[in-house]
Image: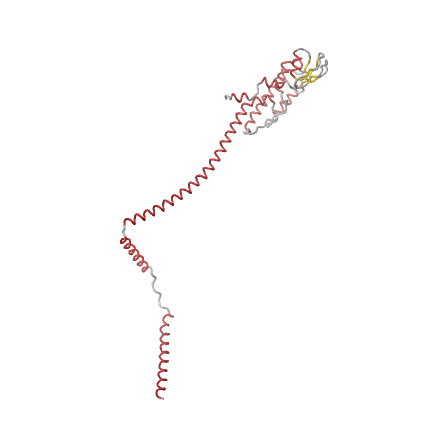
Amino acid sequence: MVLDKRLIERSLSVKEVAFLAEQEPISILPRYTMNGIKLIGRDMKKLKPLQKTDVPLWIALLLKKQHKCNIVIPPWLSVPYLKNKHAEEQRLKDRVTDLPWHWIPTAKLLLEACPDDFIDSPHEIRSLIQDLREVRLLKTRQGFTQIDDDYLELTGLSLMEINEIRPFLLQTMDKLHDLKKVSAEEDVNNAEKGDYSRHNSNHENLNENYNHNININSSFQGNGSRYDSSDVDEELSHNVSANDATLVEQQPAPMPATKRQRVGPRANTSTEAHTNNMASDSDSDSDVEYRR
């Protein structure tokens, strides 16, 4: 994979990381007496023979090159310590062990400048450091499966290890960020599209209803233009007579005469007889008066 030049420029080179590592303090045993030196970052005390003193690594390397001191090798650059760290790295699956921030360039510089100051075999120490680096690098690559566009767990990694994976890591996180942004935009567009489609559907339904009404009106107007008033009246009368015939056909049959209905005329007959009797009585009364 070809990396962008911009990404490479954002990472440090091996020499720059080594330069930063040379600022770390380390203990030395001077062979000669030397006066103190004022430095930009810190002041170096007066050196006395065989008196342990802490100085920056670059001064220790310079004095060692001039055969004016012996460098005290740090405890973590020993065979037992490195073996324990290697076993711990193999045992832990989800994280890396804690090592000094500049353990890789410091070990490289000391192995090259003062192999005679090591208590253990420099060759064995170099081999253990290489094995330790490979295990940690493999574990870091496996951790890329849990990478996010905003955050990645790098606890325990040194500056050199982070610098080695920085170009690939930055490019991967940028791609994930772009994918996340595109996905968010698609979700917004889909939501807006859904609302717009529902709005269009309602609008189309309204248009269909409106067009249907227009077609009905136009059809009615067209029919009116083809028929005159006499035809319309004739058609209406024909429809009315047809409806009347239908109503007559649908008229229910008369109910059969019930017993109460047969009593009705008898009741009327008795009433008429009573009325006649009253009339005859009145006539008889008038006859009596006339006789008197």
Residue 261 picture quarter: bottom left
Q: How is the image coloured?
A: secondary structure
Residue placed furthest toward the top: 66
Q: Quadrant of residue 287?
A: bottom left
Nearest the eye: 140 or 24 = 24
Left or right of 48? Residue 279 is left
In the rendered image, the vertical position of residue 209 relative to residue 72, given as above or below: below
Q: Is residue 258 above or below residue 55?
A: below
- Which x, y percent locates residue 183? 49, 32
Give coordinates of residue 70: x percent, y percent. Answer: 68, 14
Direction from residue 5 to residue 48 in the image, left or right: right
Picture coordinates of residue 104, whole percent (x, y): 61, 19
**Count of numbered circles in the view:** 0
* Residue in front for this viewpoint, 229 or 109: 229
Q: Residue furthest bottom?
A: 292
Q: Position of residue 275 (x, y in %)?
A: 36, 78
Where residue 37 sits, quadrant-wise, is top right
Quarter of the image containing the C terminus? bottom left
Out of 243 and 112, give the one closest to the viewer: 243
Q: Look at the picture and state if 290 lies above or below 111.
A: below
Left/right placement of residue 210 relative to residue 169 reads: left
